[in-house]
């Protein structure tokens, strides 16, 4: 079997991905905490900043056992050193929507297939109620 070499070479990581990896290395050496999360939120452009601020309030009010920390430069909430959920603004990787994600440490299991990342375009009372239920279930 002959392997063809292509003229296309991989570009490797994007500048956004490299920045996220640098953030992660810095975080592993830092004490982190709520101050770092609030600073990360403050650096976000709108509308991500407003959404992250609201999610921070929802998560800390409804899952007080989770500790705020940054994870790849974004707000995350952990049980001990294990991230349970995280917010990724759309600006971070230039996507069309922000996301609220849950790690495998979240207790969202529902049969054999269940969602772990949710697209967010805006937060109304309906979405906030759904997020509260997800957060409570994740730590339950």
Image (spheres, rainbow, N blue to C red):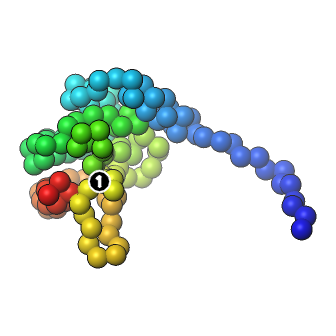
Horizontally, residue 65 falls left or right of residue 40, namely left
Which residue is drawn at the image coordinates 10% and 48% (left, top)?
62
Residue 124, percent from left and from top: 16, 56
Quadrant of res 108: bottom left
Q: Quadrant of the N terminus?
A: bottom right
Q: Badge 1: few (under 14), some or many (20 or more) residues near its Cα, within 10 Å?
A: some
Residue 115, percent from left and from top: 33, 66
Residue 59, percent from left and from top: 16, 46
- Out of 64 and 75, give the one closest to the viewer: 64
Q: Is residue 43 above or below residue 90?
A: above
Which residue is drawn at the image coordinates 29% and 38% (left, top)?
81
Which residue is drawn at the image coordinates 30% and 43% (left, top)?
82
Kindly tell me whether residue 106 is visible in this rendering.
yes
- Out of 125 and 24, give the one closest to the viewer: 24
Horizontally, residue 99 falls left or right of residue 16, namely left
Is disc 1 placed on a helix, strand or loop? loop
Q: Is residue 10 above or below residue 116?
A: above
In this view, the residue farthest toward the right is 2
Q: Quadrant of the C terminus?
A: bottom left
Q: Is residue 33 above or below residue 7?
A: above
Q: How many marks?
A: 1
Q: Give the residue pinned by disc 1.
A: 105
Kindly tell me whether residue 121 is visible in this rendering.
no
Which residue is drawn at the image coordinates 11% and 42% (left, top)?
64
């Amino acid at each position: 079997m002959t392997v063809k070499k292509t003229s296309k070479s991989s570009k490797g990581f994007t500048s956004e991905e490299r920045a996220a990896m640098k953030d992660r290395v810095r975080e592993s050496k830092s004490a982190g905490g709520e101050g770092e999360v609030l600073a990360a939120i403050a650096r976000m452009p709108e509308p991500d900043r407003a959404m992250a601020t609201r999610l921070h309030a929802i998560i800390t009010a409804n899952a007080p056992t989770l500790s705020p920390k940054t994870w790849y430069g974004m707000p995350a909430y952990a049980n001990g050193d294990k991230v349970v959920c995280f917010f990724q603004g759309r600006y971070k990787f230039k996507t069309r929507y922000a996301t609220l994600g849950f790690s495998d440490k979240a207790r969202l299991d529902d049969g054999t297939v269940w969602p772990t990342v949710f697209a967010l375009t805006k937060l109304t009372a309906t979405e906030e109620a759904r997020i509260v239920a997800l957060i409570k279930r994740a730590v339950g």
